[in-house]
Each structure stands twice: as structure tokens, then as C-alpha cells.
Amino acid sequence: MAGTTGIRGARIGAAASSLHGDATPMADRIAVSYWDAQGNETVRWYAADIAEEDIPETIDSPRTGLPAGRDQLNPPSASTAVPYKTHFEYVQERRTADEGEQLLAEALERLRERRGTVKSN
């Protein structure tokens, strides 16, 4: 890949040896493939001495954003995402329309008192 620094995956202290013309020794690593529901493969590299249980079973595919798993024939299905709720929608879940009108009236009353524009009844 063009434009890389050449030290990714290298052992600690390997940069100094490259200054002297030695080849940069690479750390031992393994490639793990993940597939999403559209059949896209993503390869992640892990240290060779990593425990099997520390390698994630699923990742988010960088290409599609879908979950990707290690089983090519049975990739994980896309989870149903809950749509984003606005602040107003959360407030509507907690308050009735009458409570909202009452809170608005109280807030307007306090604002008018601060500004000195309270109307006498």
C-alpha cells in the first residue's frame, strides 16, 4: 500500500535497525477474515500469540457498516436499528399534552417576571 510508514506491525525498536539498512523484522501475526451479508471480505491482522477467545467473532464491515462474522457461509444478519429519536420525542414520551401546556405557561410566566412584563389579572 503506497504512503504507509513501513513500521506498522514491526517490533518495538525495529525503527532504529532500519536506519542502519537492516530489514525491518515483522512481528508474527495471523490474518482473520470476516464476511458481511453482502459477501464482502474484510481481513484483520492479529498478533500470532493472541488467545483465540480474544479474537472478536464479529466486527463492523468498513465497506458496508453491516456486521461481519468469521463464517463465510453464515454471515451475521443486519440488526434492526432503532431510528434516532429527537429530544422532543423523548419529552413527549414522558409528558402529556396538558402537562406540556402547563409547563410552557409556567416557563413563560417566569420569563415575563424576569423581564418585568407581567400582566396583572
Image: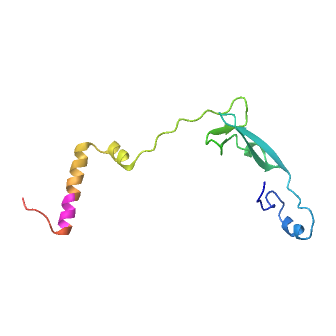
Which region is colored magenta? 108-113
Q: Is residue 63 left or right of residue 103?
A: right
Q: Is residue 48 visible?
A: no
Residue at point 93%, 65% (across, down): 22
Q: Is residue 8 above or below residue 46?
A: below
| Residue 26: percent from left, percent from top | 86, 56
Residue 98 on the magenta segment: no
Query: Looking at this rendering, what residue extends furthest in the top direction?
Result: 73
| Residue 45: percent from left, percent from top | 78, 48
Residue at point 76%, 40% (across, down): 33
Residue at point 18%, 64% (across, down): 112
| Residue 54: percent from left, percent from top | 73, 46
- Quadrant containing the N terminus in the rendered view: bottom right
Q: Quadrant of residue 20?
A: bottom right
Q: Is residue 63 above or below residue 20?
A: above
Which secondary structure is most common in the magenta stretch? helix
Q: Is residue 31 left or right of residue 76?
A: right
Q: Is residue 108 visible?
A: yes
Residue at point 81%, 61% (across, down): 7
